[in-house]
């Protein structure tokens, strides 16, 4: 077996062993009773992969339109953000009920592939012992960013793979090689996860500049190499445009997220995160096995390494580290917007640069004692700077000290025979021990510090089976109901609902659900759905999960109805009035004070309340408080006793009646009026509705009016060849008298432009196969002899 192949396989094996070993120590799924269902892993990634499973097995509702979430949302932006990794389709190989196992397996697989990719790059850029390449390459894949953040944001791990691949493309550009393969690699990286691929591209550009400097490339040759790099990147991004452009425009139409100002982390905390077994949500997870900073530190003191190699790499490490703490460069790394959440998502680039610097020294042989002591001093100084940090743990100090001693001892041992084997054991043991401990510590800390959700279990499987049995789409919707499992229950459990959580949650969807009484978290991007008879009728919910069973109702409307001619409803501050405007009938009675008439169903709208509300013996919990979250319109049950008021207890533990001017409102729903209103609208509902891969067709009763489809009016909808209208935020079209057919299609904004850019990039790539390109390829051996490896 060639040494490079052996190195890559060993690196992949070490990475998988460290991740699984750490999870086993922490007794975290799938190796113990503690679950991994935290934050976006539970809210987005697992449900979206479950939806991908359904799509691949032909069981999903929709195609370009995802009919299950958000009453019908654009799927392509979500695909390009969460599911476009070439690894994602592998979830289809396991049963759907094992989707959490599948996502975990993908996480481990991506980490292993990142280790192999970096190891291959190291072997490509310089010589060195095959096992050292494996350990250093695995150290990159097992950096703190990967173990603490990438593990529960598995789409980011595609960026971890992208950095060494894009650096390899940079090598090809430097040597004028592989003009066709290079853009294809760039395209795959950008499609897999454009966000981290952007950061990896910046990192690869910096690495290419250093490689041009350290290989002594002349100015003219360097300019040509940079030109090839720019062209290769442009062609690759152009090839990815059919996915990237709809994602970009999906973000433009999304409900705005959190706007933050960057605040650099405390310097001692930054240094502490260089050590194993530390955790902090708002600090850079910069840990990488002690062997790496030690070898990178020795580079400063190695007289056997030319200065033109030592100082550019040292400068690049310092520059990348400093750029993470400075506001303007922070914005450059993050596409000019401080992210909601961890502000150090580019940290894996620093880990990659440190690994390349460490390998640069090893390419000239192992360091002598003087250089080794100098490198150890650098590590000790950095560790001493971290001592005041509250993030530092005794385990971090112990593991760092033991690792420094073990790796230093390995470097001092004779380099042949049994001593060489002992050195390999010491260095590999340091890597595995530190990485597994960091994994286990991060596993425990995430469950304490982050939101967590119930993992998939027997009760969820029973609920999903019951929803599937009751499903009647597109005749009616089946809502997965309460209690919520996560932010995308329709994708995880089945059914069709307003519930939806994505970076691309449409602004029109958030505005419409809020106007109708919907609740949300994450500042309007995580919609909680609606459990209300009026909205159930309007959106055709014929069955929903409630109190452990599927409850059916006859008070629902078909997907398409026809309203009388007239202006579209204009929403006001009251969700009760807004529901009536959309329904076209008065169905709520006004309470006297906080008291509803006997026989009506009592609803409370208190979006900013955090506390409990009560009607007699029935109480509900509210969790509101805009702008972070908004409590949903909630039922307090049927008013059975005359004079019983609605009481609200806020955070001050004071219980008061809900009166006008208190920021809350009570509505009294008359179910007889609702049934009459639904009966009247059914007389003007579609005779038939047929869904198509890109939209719908409906047959309507004659008479004209406004056809209203119970789905958000997203950008990209066209009906009968013209842009669709909006009717209270819903898709609509004006019908002339006598017209009985409706045809609507959806094309995600940017799909046509992205496809055009992709075709143009493909044509430009093919044109690179010219006689001039052939001459460049023939000059490649000379370029490699001049400075390559």
Image: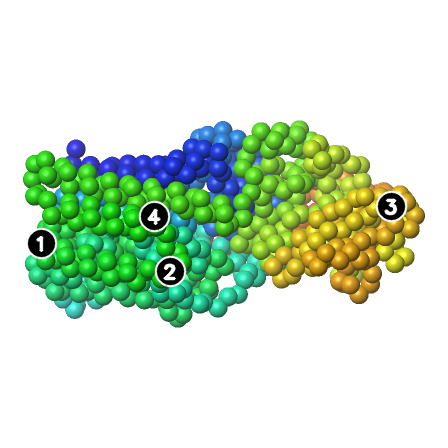
Of residue 368 and residue 514, the one placed in the foreground of this image is: 368
Q: Name which of mark 4 and mark 3 comes first in the sequence.
A: 4
Q: CA distance from mark 2 to mark 4?
A: 14 Å
Residue beneath disc 1: 368
Element at badge 4?
helix
Tell me how far mark 4 sits from mark 3, CA to CA: 59 Å
Q: Kindly report which numbered mark, 4 or 3, lies closer to the viewer in this rendering.
A: 4
Q: Secondary structure at mark 1?
A: loop
Q: Which residue is mark 3?
A: 639
Rendered location of residue 433, percent (x, y) = 29, 41
Q: Could you tell me which residue is drawn at 66 percent across and 41 percent down?
A: 483
* Residue identified by numbered label 4: 395
* Other residues around mark 1 within 10 Å, as few (<14) / some (14–19) / many (≥20): some
Whole-percent x, y for residue 418 in the image: 10, 35
**Location of residue 406 in the rendering, given as x and y in whole percent from the top left corner:** 20, 45
The residue positioned 10% from the left and 39% from the top of the image is: 419
Cα–Cα gap, marks 1 and 3: 85 Å
Answer left or right for 496 relative to 429: right
| Residue that label 2 marks | 389
Q: Earlier in the sequence, mark 2 or mark 4?
A: 2
């Amino acid at each position: 077996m060639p040494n490079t192949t052996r190195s890559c396989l060993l690196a992949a094996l070490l990475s998988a062993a460290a991740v699984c070993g750490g999870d086993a120590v922490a007794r975290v799924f799938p190796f113990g009773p503690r679950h991994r269902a935290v934050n976006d892993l539970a809210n987005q990634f697992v449900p979206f992969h479950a939806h991908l499973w359904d799509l691949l097995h032909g069981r999903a509702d929709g195609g370009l339109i995802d009919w299950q979430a958000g009453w019908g949302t654009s799927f392509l932006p979500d695909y390009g953000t969460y599911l476009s990794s070439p690894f994602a389709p592998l979830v289809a190989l396991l049963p759907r009920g094992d989707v959490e196992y599948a996502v975990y397996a993908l996480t481990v697989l991506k980490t292993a592939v990142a280790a192999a990719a970096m190891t291959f790059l190291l072997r490509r850029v310089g010589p060195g012992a095959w096992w050292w390449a494996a350990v250093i390459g695995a150290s990159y894949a097992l950096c703190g960013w990967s173990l603490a953040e990438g593990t529960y944001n598995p789409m980011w791990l595609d960026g971890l793979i992208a950095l060494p691949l894009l650096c390899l493309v940079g090598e090809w550009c430097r040597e004028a090689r592989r003009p066709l393969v290079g853009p294809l690699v760039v395209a795959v990286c950008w499609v897999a996860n454009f966000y981290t691929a952007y950061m990896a591209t910046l990192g690869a550009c910096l690495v290419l500049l250093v490689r041009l400097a350290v290989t002594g490339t002349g100015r003219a040759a360097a300019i040509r190499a940079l030109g090839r790099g720019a062209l290769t990147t442009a062609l690759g991004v152009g090839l990815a445009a059919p996915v990237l452009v709809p994602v970009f425009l999906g973000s433009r139409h999304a409900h705005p997220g959190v706007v933050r100002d960057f605040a650099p982390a405390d310097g001692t905390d930054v240094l502490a995160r260089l050590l194993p077994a530390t955790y902090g949500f708002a600090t850079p997870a910069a840990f990488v096995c002690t062997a790496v900073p030690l070898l990178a530190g020795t580079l400063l003191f190695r007289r056997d390494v030319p200065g033109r190699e030592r100082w550019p790499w040292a400068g690049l490490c310092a520059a990348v580290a400093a750029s993470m703490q400075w506001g303007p460069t922070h914005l450059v790394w993050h596409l000019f917007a401080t992210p909601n959440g961890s502000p150090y998502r580019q940290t894996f680039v620093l880990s990659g640069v440190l690994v390349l610097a460490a390998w640069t020294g090893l390419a000239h042989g192992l360091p002598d004692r003087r250089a080794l002591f100098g490198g150890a001093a650098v590590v000790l100084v950095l560790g001493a700077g971290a001592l005041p940090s509250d993030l530092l743990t005794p385990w971090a100090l112990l593991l760092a000290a033991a690792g420094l001693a073990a790796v230093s001892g390995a470097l001092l041992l004779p380099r042949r025979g049994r001593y060489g084997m002992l050195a390999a054991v010491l260095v590999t043991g340091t890597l595995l021990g530190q990485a597994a401990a960091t994994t286990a510590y991060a596993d425990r800390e995430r469950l304490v510090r982050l939101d967590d959700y119930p993992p998939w279990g027997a009760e969820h499987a029973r609920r999903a089976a019951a929803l599937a049995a009751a499903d009647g789409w597109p005749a009616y919707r089946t809502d997965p109901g309460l209690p919520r499992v996560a932010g995308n229950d329709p994708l995880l459990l089945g059914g069709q609902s307003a519930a939806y959580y994505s970076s691309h949650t449409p602004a029109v969807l958030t505005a419409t659900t809020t106007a109708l009484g919907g609740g949300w978290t994450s500042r309007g991007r995580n919609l909680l759905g609606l459990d209300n008879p009026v909205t159930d009728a309007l959106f055709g919910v014929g069955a929903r999960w409630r109190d452990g069973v599927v409850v059916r109702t006859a008070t629902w409307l078909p997907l398409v109805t026809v309203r009388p001619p007239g202006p579209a409803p204009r929403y006001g501050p009251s969700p009760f009035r807004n529901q009536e405007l959309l329904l076209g009938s008065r169905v709520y009675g006004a309470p006297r004070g906080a008291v509803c008439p006997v026989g009506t169903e009592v609803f409370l709208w208190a979006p900013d309340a955090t506390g409990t509300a009560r009607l007699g013996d029935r109480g509900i919990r509210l969790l509101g408080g805009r702008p972070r979250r908004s409590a949903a319109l909630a039922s307090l049950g049927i008013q059975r006793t005359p004079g019983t008021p609605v009481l609200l207890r806020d955070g001050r533990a004071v219980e008061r009646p809900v009166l006008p001017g208190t920021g809350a409102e009570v509505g009294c729903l008359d179910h007889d009026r609702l049934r009459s209103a639904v009966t009247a609208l059914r007389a003007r509902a579609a005779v038939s509705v047929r869904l198509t891969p890109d939209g719908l067709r409906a047959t309507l009763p004659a008479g004209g009016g406004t056809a209203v489809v119970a789905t958000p009016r997203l950008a990209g909808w066209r009906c009968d060849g013209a842009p669709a209208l909006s009717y209270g935020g819903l898709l609509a079209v004006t019908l002339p008298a006598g017209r009985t057919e409706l045809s609507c299609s959806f094309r995600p904004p940017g799909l046509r432009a992205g496809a055009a850019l992709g075709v143009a990039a493909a044509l430009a790539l093919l044109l690179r196969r010219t006689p001039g390109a052939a001459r460049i390829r023939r000059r490649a051996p000379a370029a490699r002899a001049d400075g390559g490896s």
